[in-house]
Amino acid sequence: MKLQTVEYYFREVVISMVRNRWMSFASIGTVAVSLFILGVFLILVMNMTKMASALESQVQISAYLNDDISKEERNDIERMTKALSAVSKVEYIPKESALKILRERLGDNQKILDALGDSNPLPNAFLVTVNSADAVKSTADAIADLYGVEEVKYGQDVASNIFNLTHLIRLFGLILTIILAGATIFIIANTIRLTVFARRKEIAIMKYVGATDWFIRIPFILEGIGLGIIGGTLSAFALRSFYAAMETKIYSTLAFFPMVEQYPFMNYVTVSLILAGIFVGILGSTISLKKFLQV
């Protein structure tokens, strides 16, 4: 491509944006608002996903041991449990510690345990943490088969409800993102179409004098890219401010809420929004030009 042709393309883009400045402002505004709304839902979905992962990670397996096993047998159980692929942590809870924890949880009602005297009916146990929610049941079954393990519990009903909830959150987030992305492309494409419609006579004249489709198309695509970059950048900066304010507000009231860290997360979001602006600018221009090139 000749340098003069490149200069012509960029000169046409600048002239078009200045000549149709109100339409350009409308297109930039539409891109910025649409991508901002999409970005808000994306960060909400990401934080919902992190919350779901945090809920899943709190599901632990309690392996209760027989009272008559030796220390060597207990060590064997611990070693074989740690060897399981999905296990990330194994903590031994002796019966004395378990009773102390139970007393603390009962609070004012711990007098109920006074009737036990010096006896301790609680078993020794291992508290097992797994690194994958899907592996909880299979890991629990494997631990239950070990010699010396009397019973295994992981709150099967509660865990099942948590897993169902987290899967629903992820599915809802994915569907919502796809719908909003489609709506964003539709709105932006139609906004850019108005810009193209305003220059339909110019396009027709260029076609009649022998200009190729790509010669006509490239300035519009470059203009769409420019509008997309500006709109995407504006939406990214607005979204960064929004997320910073939201993070401050949430942490001031819910200090332990599992939010996605602002950095580098928002850097990725910024780049994604600018790239999305470029993509929808190209797509919107291409879709809008198709009809007017058929002269």
Image (tube, rainbow, N blue to C red):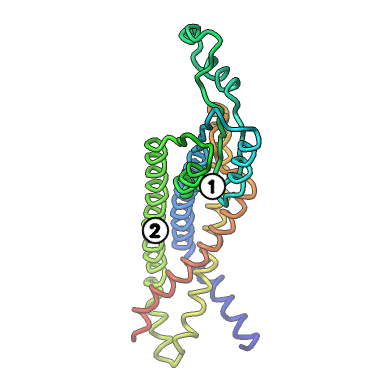
Place of residue 81 in the rendered image (x, y in percent of width and height, measured from the top left): 58, 44
- Horizontal side of 107 relative to 185 (left or right) equals right
Q: Which secondary structure lies at badge 1?
A: helix
Residue at image mark 1: 239
Picture layout, residue 139 above or below residue 207 = above
Residue at image mark 2: 178
> In front here: 176 or 23?
176
- Horizontal side of 35 relative to 75 (left or right) equals left
> In front here: 199 or 171?
171
Q: Quadrant of residue 189?
A: bottom left
Nearer to us: label 1 or label 2? 2
Place of residue 168 in the rendered image (x, y in percent of width and height, measured from the top left): 37, 47
Picture layout, residue 60 above or below residue 138 = above
**Could you tell me the amino acid type at mark 2?**
Ile
Residue in the picture at 45% in, 52% down: 38
Residue in the picture at 42% in, 34% down: 155
**Could you tell me the amino acid type at mark 1?**
Leu
Distance from label 1 to label 2 (Cα)? 19 Å
- Horizontal side of 91 relative to 209 (left or right) equals right
Place of residue 15 in the rendered image (x, y in percent of width and height, measured from the top left): 54, 71
Crowding at mark 2 (Cα within 10 Å: few <14, some 14-19, many 20+): few
Place of residue 82 in the rendered image (x, y in percent of width and height, measured from the top left): 61, 45
